[in-house]
């Protein structure tokens, strides 16, 4: 199979930067990126997918235990008074532990971010462009789970075989799910099974399994609005242009203007899809309204 | 009109504790409360409400500016590296500034919380019952906005005239929206207009306008699943049993087991309802999955 | 008396920038500023001041109650386990509530900070120059309290009469305390008595009582190493060059390279000085070792 | 040598609880513990030790990098405005990374803390007894470094040979430093050298090198006021009464009422002592004034 899907060359990958770009597509000052593809009509169609009413969360609990893979444990403290109690949440949500949404200002490439905005638009007080509040009205759309272990007939993706772009299409086809503009594409790689089989692996410390960079042009071709994933970028990417850095993050966030739903919890969703025998659903991702923020912790909910 | 709707007596209010109680209704160890009323069928029916696809947020931006009315400003800091940026969010979300959901462990009454659980189930590490993770699969249901200023023909509710229970029904009827079991009832009082007209008022410092305690039995009668509001409890309540404390908070959270969506931002929603000429919509409230947490900051999204 | 001490003219004040400057005095890359004046010999002499052994703190408790004057309340939470308990402290210490030390990177003037370093040396990750870790070995020196209410025969300084530079010398002389190089000069203005007499005043909201800008050249003349104060800058300064901003902060931090001990609690110290009939003492200010930090919360201790 | 210093038996160790106890010694409501031993006269004598004026910090920089050994990295963020910058510090200081002082409420034993106070005196809002604000006037006293690697002629203490009580006295004698009531006893074990030689060791994860429980009665015999250390408790203790828990922590904090200075940075101090050929100095430990707090991050300063 690999033979019929040769890896892209260095030059081909360098061509992706232009191929996937959405810079200027929604105006010079746009900060919403591919979320623009989620029209009222798209939301209407997504709501029409609901049949059984089953609801499934795509979020892990906030992880308060520091250690390898969770360098920034969430702080959670309760304060208890005689008649009530409150809590304090302190969180650096980026990284490899907490389920969160990346805003378009989160990643820079050669001093620029999405839409060609300068990285200097980001200050310690907040980002002047590409911030998460561009999505303050929520992200409600059709979600499609692409179950790669099911496609491959294995329990999890391995370091040796990153998830390829053609596999996204093959998984969709195998599930009978056409990829449509404005979709939230959710790619399941089987991270817990991988971690169980690789107990010394540390999330965020390469080598890491995950999506090959050639997934980016496939997402662009189908005009996906969001990418959710449990495994993140295969790293190192194998392409010198990215050096030791992330590849899919750069192409999607900076060039496509596509939000990433990192560290999604996908086993329950994969199980629900198999039980429902449907891999599409209404998905609501409601990021907190954080002015100038680089993303948000989220609890995305799929309704079947 | 007030004549035909006399205020309940002290004794009548004391009777509410039993009248509205859902203790034991969903089992002795239930922590989800009225969210149990949101069945898969209810979610299906809620999704079927979507017609125009318009999406509206019910959340204020996190308020980072301390001052009267915001004693616990959100902390928001960005850390900027050459190739990316991250942020830190630190938040005590309860109070009168941030849009948030109250879990059932948030309020105690005479040493107990919802379902008769002891307040000692709450520790500094988290609550053993009534915690927000009981709703980790999200709250997706039919929302109904009750626009009280519209009902009254004014811009905002006043201190002198709290929102009465009968007005909830009158507003629903006037809008052609039947209140159904499992609904998220959103009560708009016009808080910004009130604040503009009362510049020395401080949110959370009585006297405060809002809902009269006789709203609680009305919510119970219609088996509401959630109460969203901008004004919160009319305070002081006028009933000695509550002393200087909150009345609706106690009856809904502790006795009904009904989650509150506090400090909702309702002008955009009220405007959308008037524009759509519909006061019902699909509502998704996706609290963060915080183990043992007393609630969550949220960005609830209505889709018409 | 005021006649014999005319206010400096605008031109005279503009001259202060050059007059007080220590730029380059301790090398082009110095970040310690006037703390360089605290030599081992100075510490030895300071320790020799100890006679009675009385110890007095110059710090307020961390203020956890938000409100006017404390826009950034300290967060303090305990987490209680069966065999131990821990706490979390979250703090923005700058401002007008918490006793803290200002590092030399805290204030900029026309894009520069102390020693002519560019403000761009400060990043969201920390300051590359002028950071508090320049003082990681602590500040142990001779402290001298200048008790201005005692000098004036009043309970507190007023808005109308800021503390003048000549008064610092007059107070020292009246107390029999010569001002020496490397001293920590602690200026008591009677802030609690002022606040009691001006209940609507809000710390940090001009008009504010405090030190007139002509204190800066006096501190420079005597080569003070640190300025501690309860009232901070008289504001507005009355000099157009500073606009609505702070004057003493700019001249001391940016041009002298002199650390400020803001919001010091000085009543107990003033009482101890009067009881001991001595206004000099060993002072230890031990800022936390925060790499790249803009200052530190502190609990300075005077020993008589 | 070990033969002449047999390990105490289980019964002997059980006797320590009574032997070292200071409960009631300074009154039934005392929260200051052995800091009561630091009299004004003691402070006077400590200041008289200053000769060269050399100042040395005993603190590590706050550690902001999460990982094994630092489960709760300090959060440090700068916020940069045009004319100034501020920072936010968020910290759980207990554990094995940050230099901090333990208050007497930090540890419980069978539901009690120092002075027989119930553990229930600690609430999520703060401790009603044994809190760090009992030491709000600072801890200024004579410090004595006991350099165990120097005594043993090695670079660091090992897992096999914990630091024994008799060694504290032997080190003091070898250095010509009599241990006196009210002293801050600082025990250097060579933690960095141990970590370099044991790269897979994780601070706080037993087995850990450090002080044998028989150090406690020696500290009590000499009426030490504070124990500073880099290695902490040898763990496991080898005595069943402590189970898998800490031994020295329990005896010193709960029974002696003696504050611990955990994770002290002692190489620079050990070097300074060797260079000065003196192992005693003025020590100032100025904990932040945190009402009800379980301790404080500190930057203790030794002056020779």
Image (spheres, coloured by chain):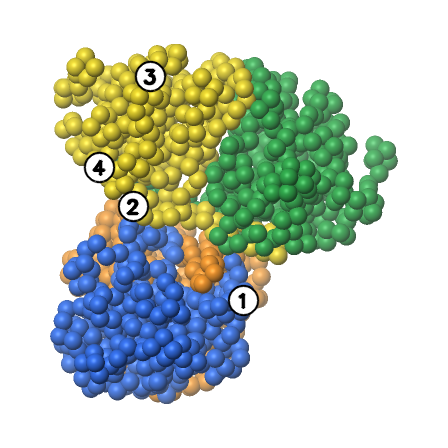
Chain colours: A green, B yellow, C blue, D orange
Whole-angstrom CA distance, mark 1 to mark 2, is 35 Å
3 and 4 marks in contact (CB < 8 Å): no
Label 4 environment density (alpha carbons within 10 Å; few <14, some 14–19, many ≥20):
some
Residue under the image location 52 percent in, 72 percent down:
C117
Label 1 environment density (alpha carbons within 10 Å; few <14, some 14–19, many ≥20):
some
**A160, above or below D259, in the image:** above
Q: Are marks 4 and 1 on the same chain?
A: no
Q: Are marks 3 and 1 on the same chain?
A: no
Label 2 environment density (alpha carbons within 10 Å; few <14, some 14–19, many ≥20):
some
Q: Which residue is mark 3?
A: B171
Q: Tell me the mark number nearer the camera, choosing from 3 and 1.
A: 3
4 and 2 marks in contact (CB < 8 Å): no
Res. B188 in view: yes
Give the letter of the chain under mark 2: B
Give the letter of the chain under mark 4: B
Q: Nearer the viewer, residue B67 or D78?
A: B67
Give the letter of the chain under mark 3: B
Whole-angstrom CA distance, mark 3 to mark 1, is 59 Å
Q: Quadrant of the N terminus of chain A?
A: top right
Q: For this view, does D271 lie left or right of residue B7?
A: right
Q: Which residue is mark 1?
A: C121
Q: Which residue is mark 4?
A: B206
Tell me, for residue B68, which label it has, or none: 2
**B171, above or below B66, in the image:** above
Q: What secondary structure is found at the residue carrying circle 1? A: helix
């Amino acid at each position: 199979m690999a033979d019929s899907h040769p890896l892209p060359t260095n030059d081909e990958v360098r061509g992706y930067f232009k191929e996937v770009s959405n810079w200027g597509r929604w105006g010079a000052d746009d900060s919403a990126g591919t979320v623009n593809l989620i029209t009222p009509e798209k939301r209407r169609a997504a709501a029409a997918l609901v049949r059984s009413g089953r609801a499934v969360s795509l979020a892990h609990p906030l992880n308060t235990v520091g250690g390898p893979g969770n360098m920034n444990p969430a702080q959670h403290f309760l304060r208890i008074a005689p008649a009530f109690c409150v809590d304090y949440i302190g969180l650096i949500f980026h990284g490899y532990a907490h389920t969160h949404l990346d805003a378009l200002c989160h990643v820079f490439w050669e001093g620029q971010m999405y839409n060609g905005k300068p990285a200097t638009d980001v200050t310690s007080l907040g980002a002047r462009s590409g911030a998460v509040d561009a999505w303050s009205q929520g992200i409600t759309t059709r979600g499609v789970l692409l179950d790669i272990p099911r496609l491959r007939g294995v329990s999890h993706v391995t370091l040796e075989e990153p998830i390829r772009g053609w596999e996204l299409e093959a998984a969709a086809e195998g599930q009978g799910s056409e990829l449509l503009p404005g979709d939230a594409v959710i790619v399941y790689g089987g991270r817990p099974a991988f971690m169980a089989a690789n107990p010394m692996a540390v999330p965020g410390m390469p080598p890491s399994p995950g999506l090959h960079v050639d997934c980016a042009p496939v997402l662009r071709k189908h005009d996906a609005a969001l990418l959710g994933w449990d495994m993140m970028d295969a790293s190192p990417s194998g392409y010198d242009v990215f050096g030791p850095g992330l590849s899919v993050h750069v192409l999607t966030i900076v060039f496509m203007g596509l939000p990433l739903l990192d560290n999604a919890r996908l086993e329950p969703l994969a199980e629900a899809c198999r039980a429902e025998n449907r891999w599409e659903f209404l998905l609501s991702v409601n990021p907190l309204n954080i002015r100038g923020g680089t993303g948000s912790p989220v609890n995305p909910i799929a309704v079947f």
